[in-house]
Image (cartoon, rainbow, N blue to C red):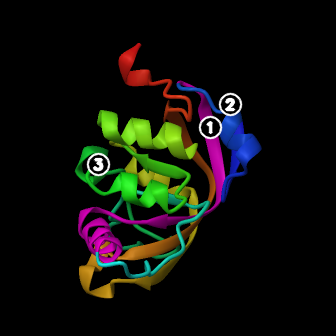
Amino acid sequence: MKKITFPITEEQLNDLKAGDRVLASGYLYTARDAAHKRMYELLCDGKSLPIDVDGQTIYYVGAAPAKPGYAVGPCGPTSSYRMDKYAPSLLDCGLKVMIGKGIRNDEVIESMKKNNAVYLIAIGGAAALIAKSITKSELVCYEDLGTEAIYRYEVKDMPLIVGIDSKGGNVYKR
């Protein structure tokens, strides 16, 4: 099991291979379909993003409300293919890590290789377990989207698997 920290360093990123199990700690952003669509439209209009994604991580999640004593409620990953239209634009802005579940299309994989980025898999059905690794949650923007707003999470030992590495190694195509 490898330990990584967000924001990820180039050395850590280049050391990850498809199939590696990792425990991630540090800070990441959350964003799902609606937030991705808004960011994509900003980029298409030549405007700045509401967050600086350069070197950052985005987790495709919309957490449930938090129970007392927890930073967030259950927060399992959403299907990543729904962000495939938007991912290459964010990768071109410097995004280094995407976390979700399921396959990615060829355009996203080529963009990951071009931009030296990785795709990590969070296990679907483990939403309550994943929530235990999130120690802090802070609303960043798009509050009107509710659970799909962009949040900044602090995580400690979040269990993940490298789904697609920066060279195109892919656990879905073995």
Task: Report the residue that reaches farthest toward the top.
Answer: 174
Task: Choose top left, top right, bottom left or bottom right for residue 106.
Answer: top left
Q: Are marks 1 and 2 in contact (CB under 8 Å)?
A: yes
Residue 124 at x, y = what percent? 34, 41
Residue 131 visible (yes or no): no
Q: Secondary structure at mark 2?
A: loop
Q: Are marks 3 and 2 in contact (CB under 8 Å)?
A: no
Numbered badge on residue 22: 1
Residue ID for mark 2: 1
Q: 87 or 143, which is in the foreground?
A: 87
Measured Cα–Cα span from mark 3 to mark 2: 28 Å
Task: Choose top left, top right, bottom left or bottom right for residue 56.
Answer: bottom right
Q: Up-down: is 59 above or below 162?
A: below
Magenta span: 19-44
Other-residue count near label 2 (Cα within 10 Å), few / some / many at <14 / 14–19 / ≥20: few
Measured Cα–Cα span from mark 1 to mark 3: 23 Å
